[in-house]
Amino acid sequence: MVITGGTGGMGLATARLMGHDHRIVLADLDRARLDDAVSELATSGVEAIGVVCDITDQASVERLFQRAESEESHVRAVVHAAGVSPHMGTAERIARINATGTVNIARAFLARAADGDALVNVASTAGHSLPKPLIPLRAFRLAEHRPDEFEKAIVRRARFAGRRLTPGLAYAISKNFVHWYSRFLAARFGERGARVLSVSPGSFDTEMGRLEKDHGAGDLVKSAAIKRFGKPEEVAAVLAFCASEAPGYLTGVDILVDGGTKAGKEFARAQRSAL
């Protein structure tokens, strides 16, 4: 199986779980991080290889899958965890990596998907927080064939929030796209007997999560039913289950793993409205 963004946090935790019955191929941009992750997994008895891959480059993604197929005759599952958060780049970079990168991974896998295969896209609870007028649904349909226009549409819409908040809104839009695209692809994957879905983590104790702790992620915990950051192993358990062959009828949906944050915020709003 292939795990993008597999060198830390959720991706590496998923590799530890899946690696006892799958051959693991980790993908990341950084060779040193890949080597460290492969060595760390080996100490846990998990065999893995690392492949440098730029998910924004279709040719690089194709090479990733070809390398994975050279290790195993068929790639049965993909957990697509690669992505960037609001404080890791501009709105343009966020749109390219989180949105177009997801398209590139999904299309490469769909071209070779077979019965029992699964693609699990890592989205975010941020994708659930957008008011409908801020979601550029028309632009989402450009993603596969006119990616430049698609990315520009995300950035334009994100600028509605003002310069300071533009990356955060671009992030939320990009993750809402991951929800939409996973639903959109469900029928295509289904024609091959395969599945596709997304999983939306809330605030988790990962390198990325800690980066955003003082920029919104920490505040989300205050609204949660479970008042702490999640552990990488907790969302990895969900990702591994979704990628396994067990939930064979689970596709075209998003699974929210946010410690009850969305439920808490909705309940708080309902209470205020009742006053």
Image (cartoon, rainbow, N blue to C red):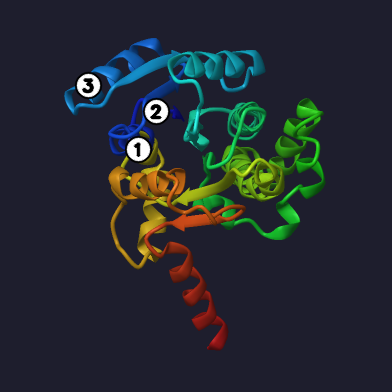
Residue 118 point in image, percent of width and height: 53, 41
CB under 8 Å between callouts 2 and 1?
A: yes
Q: In this rendering, is residue 1 above or below 241?
A: above
Give the Cα separation between the discs numbered 2 and 1.
Answer: 8 Å
Q: Quadrant of residue 6?
A: top left
User: What separation in Å lies between label 3 and label 1 (alpha carbons)?
Assistant: 14 Å
Determine which of the numbered discs, if any, sits on residue 6 in the image.
2
Secondary structure, mark 3, is: helix
Q: Quadrant of residue 253?
A: bottom right
Q: Assign a secondary structure to mark 2.
A: loop
Q: What residue sits 48% from the left and 64% below the top? A: 262
Q: Residue at x 24, y 17 (%)?
A: 39
Residue topped by disc 1: 14
Q: Which one is earlier in the sequence, the residue at label 2 or at label 1?
A: 2
Residue closest to the far left: 43
The amino acid at mark 2 is Gly
Earlier residue among tags 3 and 1? 1
